[in-house]
Amino acid sequence: MMNRDTSRIDDRPITTDESLFDTAIMKSKINTQLLNAIKSTAIDCSLYNPLNKEENLVCYGFGKVETNAFSSYPTLDQDLGEVEETNAKKARILLKETKPIEGVIYAINPKTLELYDLDSYRESLAGTGELLLVGKAVKIGRGQFRIDKV
């Protein structure tokens, strides 16, 4: 063992096996960070994130995209112009909690009757998640609703 054979983690003298182990640990940490970045930016992140609470991912996304809307434009100038225009028009939607519908409490937009997952609404208010549309409430009787799922 040479004097310059020291750990990259805590500068103590180490053997060749320990050096390989330190390298493996650092590689594992980098791989975990890359995997989390990929999961956070995946299109289906907000769909699968509620099923896996221990990972604590923050999902990034487009928000609500209409079927005829473009997600990006051919030139950067056009794309940046659209983003600024969209941000200027963006308004914070305040939702209310529903009474249990089919045994589940949702967040509802009273004007459109759109139902959102209550946990995703709370996370979006905190800035740690994206609002997840569940469906639309359809009135079937006096004070009774059913859900048309999306």
Image: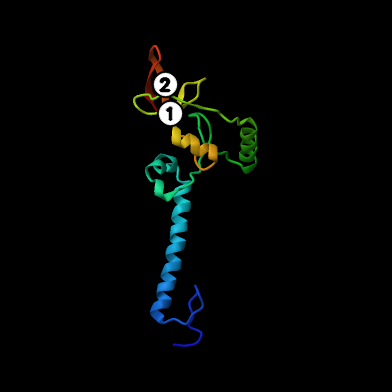
Residue with the mark numbered 2: 137
**Quadrant position of residue 17:** bottom left
What kind of element bears circle 2?
A: strand
Is residue 131 at least partly visible in the picture? no
C-alpha span from label 2 to label 1: 10 Å
First in residue order: circle 2 vs circle 1: 1
Q: Position of residue 89 (x, y in %)?
A: 63, 30
The vertical placement of 58 against 105, above or below, is: below
Residue pushed farthest front? 99
The answer to the question of whether label 2 and label 1 lie on touching residues, with beta carbons closer than 8 A, is yes
Residue with the mark numbered 1: 106
The vertical placement of 105 against 145, above or below, is: below
What kind of element bears circle 1?
A: strand
**Quadrant position of residue 142:** top left
Q: Position of residue 93 (x, y in %)?
A: 56, 28
Q: Is residue 9 left or right of residue 87?
A: left
